[in-house]
């Protein structure tokens, strides 16, 4: 269960920047692996909206995230990083869900310092630094007790301010202070969520030699990796909406694109065709030249 976590750690420790590309389903996980990405990422909003049609404002549970994350991780050989929100509301939650993530073969997650309900009309703010440290320490303890190598990324939302729907105050000094405290508690990396690219260099520089920094959605110099999300599930949903309207209005879908040459390889059709063919030959059953189209 720790093999993928070890792969993720090795990628981070190599010093070579990489992108964990969006994977919000098993097939999209296979796709990002197929095209050559070394890691994948499941965002909380991507999962809550695409699979459950609910907002990512604190009502989306870790049980639901774990369900989909497991399906994706099982479909790939590359490591999966998951948005674990706040890991629940207590240190007991943080410990319990960390064990669950490790048991499910998840390579890493990020845990944030927002107060629920978040990303909503509630003026929520951030939890105290000590509360976030206790949350991280509980996660580190769960990892140790499980014998895993899970990568724990601390998400600092200080730069995610009220105008953007976040709980922070956009105070760079506070963001750095928090990030250093989270690293001291045992975080393996930090991410400054919803911080514009132009405002990140001083934060990244302040963390140099302390803990690796990753980014959400864009690449920046001197960072370890990028967690990329939004482009996949939003495009899929927008296209589905467009074609559903076309079907409703015209009775057919002329704009659909069924050209996916890699489909059979992505779903493992050749392997199962060979398995069934071997069984049929050994048991005297008939076969056809090809499986399903």
Image (cartoon, grey):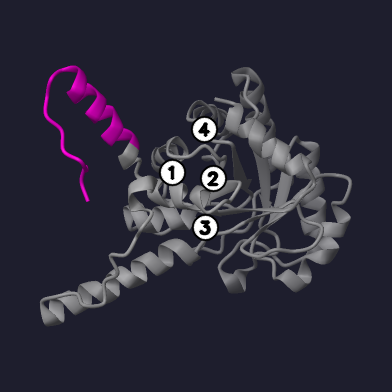
Q: Which residues are magenta?
A: 271-293
- Marks 1 and 2 in Cβ contact (< 8 Å): yes
Of mark 4 and mark 3, the one earlier in the sequence is: 4
Which mark identifies residue 65? 1
The residue indicated by pointer 2 is: 82
The one of 73 and 121 positioned closer to us in this rendering: 73
Mark 2 residue element: strand
Q: Answer yes or no: do the residues labelled 4 and 2 have beta carbons within 8 Å?
A: yes
| Quarter where residue 152 is shown | top right
In the rendering, at what x and y percent does residue 246 appear? 20, 79
Q: Position of residue 228 (x, y in %)?
A: 58, 59
CA neighbours of label 4 inside 10 A, class few (<14), some (14 to 19), many (20+): many
Q: Nearer the viewer, mark 1 or mark 3?
A: 1
Mark 3 surroundings within 10 Å by alpha-carbon count, few (fewer than 14), some (14 through 19), many (20 or more) = many
Query: Does the magenta portion include 68?
Result: no
- Of the image marks 4 and 1, the number of the one nearer the N terminus: 1
Looking at the image, tell me whether mark 3 or mark 2 is earlier in sequence order: 2
Between residues 91 and 186, which one lies in front from this camera angle? 186
N-term mark: 1 or 3: 1
Q: CA distance from mark 1 to mark 3?
A: 17 Å
Quadrant where the image shows the N terminus: top right
In three-dimensional space, the C-alpha distance between marks 3 and 2, rounded to whole angstroms, equals 18 Å
Mark-to-mark CA distance, 1 and 2? 8 Å
Residue 173 seen anywhere in this rendered image of the structure: no
Identified at 70% across, 66% down, the residue is 169
* Residue behind mark 3: 118
Cα distance, mark 4 to mark 2? 9 Å
How far apart in space, not on screen, are marks 4 and 1 (Cα)?
A: 10 Å
Residue labelled with disc 4 = 101
Q: Residue at x 50, y 64 (%)?
A: 230
């Amino acid at each position: 269960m720790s093999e993928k976590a070890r792969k993720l750690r090795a990628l981070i420790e190599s010093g070579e920047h990489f992108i964990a590309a969006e994977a919000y389903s098993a097939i999209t996980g296979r796709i990002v692996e197929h095209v050559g990405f070394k890691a994948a990422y499941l965002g909380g909003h991507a999962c809550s909206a695409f699979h459950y049609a609910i907002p990512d404002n604190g009502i989306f549970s870790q049980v639901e995230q774990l369900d989909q994350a497991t399906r994706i991780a099982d479909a790939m050989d590359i490591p999966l990083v998951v948005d674990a929100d706040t890991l629940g509301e207590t240190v007991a939650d943080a410990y319990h869900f960390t064990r669950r993530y490790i048991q499910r073969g998840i390579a890493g997650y990020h845990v944030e310092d927002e107060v629920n309900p978040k990303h909503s009309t509630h003026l929520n703010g951030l939890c105290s630094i000590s509360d976030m440290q206790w949350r991280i320490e509980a996660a580190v303890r769960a990892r140790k007790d499980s014998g895993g190598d899970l990568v724990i990324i601390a998400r600092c939302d200080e730069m995610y301010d009220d105008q953007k729907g976040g709980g922070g105050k956009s105070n760079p000094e506070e963001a750095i202070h928090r990030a250093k405290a989270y690293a001291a508690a045992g975080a393996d990396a930090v991410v400054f969520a919803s911080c514009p690219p132009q405002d990140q260099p001083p934060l990244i520089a302040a963390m140099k030699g302390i803990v690796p920094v990753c980014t959400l959605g864009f690449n920046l110099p001197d960072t370890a990796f990028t967690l990329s999300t939004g482009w996949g599930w939003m495009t899929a949903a927008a296209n589905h909406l467009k074609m559903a309207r076309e079907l409703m209005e015209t009775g057919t879908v002329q704009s659909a694109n069924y050209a996916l040459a890699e489909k059979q390889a992505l779903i493992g059709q050749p392997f199962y065709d060979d398995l069934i063919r071997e069984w049929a030959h050994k048991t005297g059953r008939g076969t056809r030249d090809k499986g399903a189209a």
